[in-house]
Amino acid sequence: MTRSLLALAASCATLLALGGAASAELGSSSAKAVRLAEATMIVEVNATDGDAGLQVFLDGEPWRSMRVTGPDGRTILDVTTKERLDDYGLTELFSESSEPSFDVFPLAKFKKLFPAGTYSFAGRTIEGAALTGSARLSHDIPRGPRILAPSEGAPVARSGVVARWGAVAQPTGVDVVAYRAIVTQEEPLLRVLSVDLPASARRVEIPRAFLASSGEYSLEVQAIERSGNQTLTEVSFRVR
């Protein structure tokens, strides 16, 4: 009887030790929780077409799942890798919502659908550790730049093409911190020139080397708010 009791006590001790080790291992796993390297959410408005879209971006260690929850507690995005990607994982993720016209989906309705505030990011790395982050979505949206040159549909010489835009009065609380000028030619091959400029900039010269001897181009100028929200205006022009 004594030996049986001793054996039982030894077994219990072993189980307790194993349980303690497992708990320590779980504690160690939870201690490995990491933050996303970057998480952003912005609103992009197209002042020319009259529409708005939500853009979500995240970057972090390889992960197999990610969920984005709004300030109202509702999940707006839930991504899980499958099969071959399960143990390989993703790192970056960029997504942009659809952009229905304001005639169909007014900006006020868009803001109600995506309320301002902090959005939480929560997922799991391929090792099983928690991966977290957050992004603040703002409703501070700038007005679009007023493009002065080239004018819509205008033919321009290949040399000395200068994109110019004028200052636009902004709503109270909106702080434009930068501009971005993007020139695109879609045919015969896609070519894109993108230039980031300070808030004081009102012009940028388009290099002759970028422009073909002839063709159709689009110019997009974005006003970028401190929150990252951006509003763009665009025109098309021809190189003669």
Image (spheres, rainbow, N blue to C red):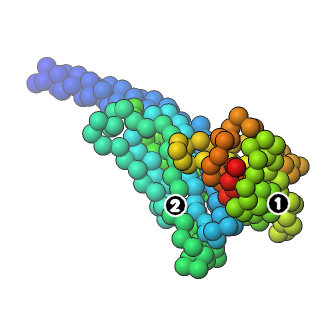
Describe residue 169's horizontal placement relative to residue 180 as left or right: right
**Amino acid bearing label 2:** Ser
- Judge left or right: residue 68 versus residue 106: left
Q: Is residue 237 above or below residue 35?
A: below
Is 102 located above or below residue 146 in the figure?
below
Is residue 148 visible to us here? yes
Tell me, for residue 97, which label it has, or none: 2
How far separated are the C-alphas under marks 1 and 2?
Answer: 30 Å
Q: Percent x, y for residue 59?
A: 55, 39
- Front residue of this view, candidates 104 and 118: 104
> What residue sits 65% from the left and 64% below the top?
46
The residue that mark 1 highlights is 148
Q: Position of residue 155 (x, y in %)?
A: 73, 55
- Give SS at disc 2: loop
Q: Earlier in the sequence, mark 1 or mark 2?
A: 2
**How busy is the neighbourhood of tag 1: few (under 14 within 10 Å), some, or many (20 plus)?**
some
Amino acid identity at mark 1: Leu
